[in-house]
Every structure is written in structure tokens, then in C-alpha cells.
Image (spheres, grey):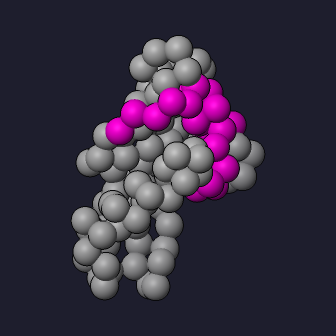
């Protein structure tokens, strides 16, 4: 897990990170997967929770070079115009990339998406 603060409003951070990683809101998951949405939301690979202007939590599964990765972002309001990002990554054992390298890469990508 990596935690860092950024001088970005929590709602703007949510929009930028959601766009960068292609996360779905619960409503978008329900629209995309229909009757399978409830089952999908109960799996470990997907999560979405939000209290707008205060907190956002998004998680999804992705593949890279044949290995599965689960990327999880929590965005919390830290103060006016400041957010705390809590980033967690789970790496499939078939991955040729070490978990720490994946975490570093995702942290850099997240910072870039926030223009940091």
C-alpha cells in the first residue's frame, strides 16, 4: 500500500483517477453487466463506494502481459483542495513484474493523472 497527499480537490481527483483507470461507478456496473452486476460487485475484483466531496473507493481487475492485476484507489478529503490517495495493488503470481514495481508504476501513473 502507498499513501500520498495531493493538492487536488477530492471530487476532481475522483474524476481524473476514474478516467485514467476506466473505473466504473456502481450505476455503470449495473448498466454494463445487468443482472450479473450484483454478483460482480460481490467479487474481490470490483468495488465502488462513494460519499461525494468526502470519500471515493474504486477497485477493478486488469490484465497485462497475461497476468491479472487488481488496482484499488481510495481518495479521501484531507482539507480544502487537498486529497489523500491510498493505493493498493494485488499482483497475479504469473506476473513477470514484481509487486513493488507494479505499485511504483501505478503510483507514478496516478500522480500523472492528477497532474502531479
Q: Which residues are magenta?
A: 4-27
- Magenta stretch: includes residue 23: yes
- Nearer-the-camera pick, 3 or 40: 3
**107 over 73 or under it: above or below:** below
- Magenta stretch: includes residue 34: no
- Give x and y (percent) for residue 62: 50, 67
Q: Quadrant of residue 51?
A: top right
Name, please, the residue furthest toward the right. Answer: 31
Q: Could you tell me if residue 32 is visible in this image?
A: yes
**91 over 73 or under it: above or below:** below
Name, please, the residue furthest toward the top. Answer: 80
**36 over 77 or under it: above or below:** below
Q: Residue at x 50, y 59 (%)?
A: 109
Q: Residue at x 31, y 79 (%)?
A: 97
Counting every numbered tag in the picture gives 0
Q: Residue at x 51, y 30 (%)?
A: 7
- Give x and y (percent) for residue 106: 43, 60
- Nearer-the-camera pick, 41 or 91: 91
Q: Residue at x 34, y 61 (%)?
A: 104
**6 over 103 or under it: above or below:** above
- Nearer-the-camera pick, 11 or 22: 11
Locate residue 46 relative to residue 95 in the image: left or right. right
Locate residue 72 relative to residue 22 in the image: left or right. left
- Give x and y (percent) for residue 77: 47, 21
- Give x and y (percent) for residue 35: 66, 48
Q: Could you tell me if residue 55 is visible in this image?
A: no
Amino acid at each position: 500500500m502507498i499513501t500520498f497527499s495531493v493538492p487536488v480537490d477530492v471530487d476532481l481527483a475522483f474524476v481524473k483517477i476514474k478516467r485514467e483507470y476506466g473505473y466504473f461507478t456502481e450505476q455503470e456496473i449495473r448498466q454494463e453487466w445487468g443482472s450479473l452486476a450484483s454478483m460482480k460487485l460481490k467479487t474481490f475484483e470490483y468495488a465502488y463506494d462513494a460519499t461525494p466531496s468526502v470519500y471515493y473507493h474504486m477497485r477493478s481487475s486488469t490484465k497485462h502481459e497475461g497476468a491479472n492485476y487488481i488496482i484499488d484507489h481510495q481518495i479521501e478529503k484531507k482539507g480544502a483542495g487537498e486529497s489523500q490517495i491510498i493505493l493498493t495493488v494485488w499482483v497475479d503470481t504469473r506476473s513477470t513484474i514484481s509487486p513493488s514495481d507494479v505499485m511504483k508504476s501505478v503510483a507514478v501513473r496516478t500522480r500523472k493523472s492528477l497532474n502531479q
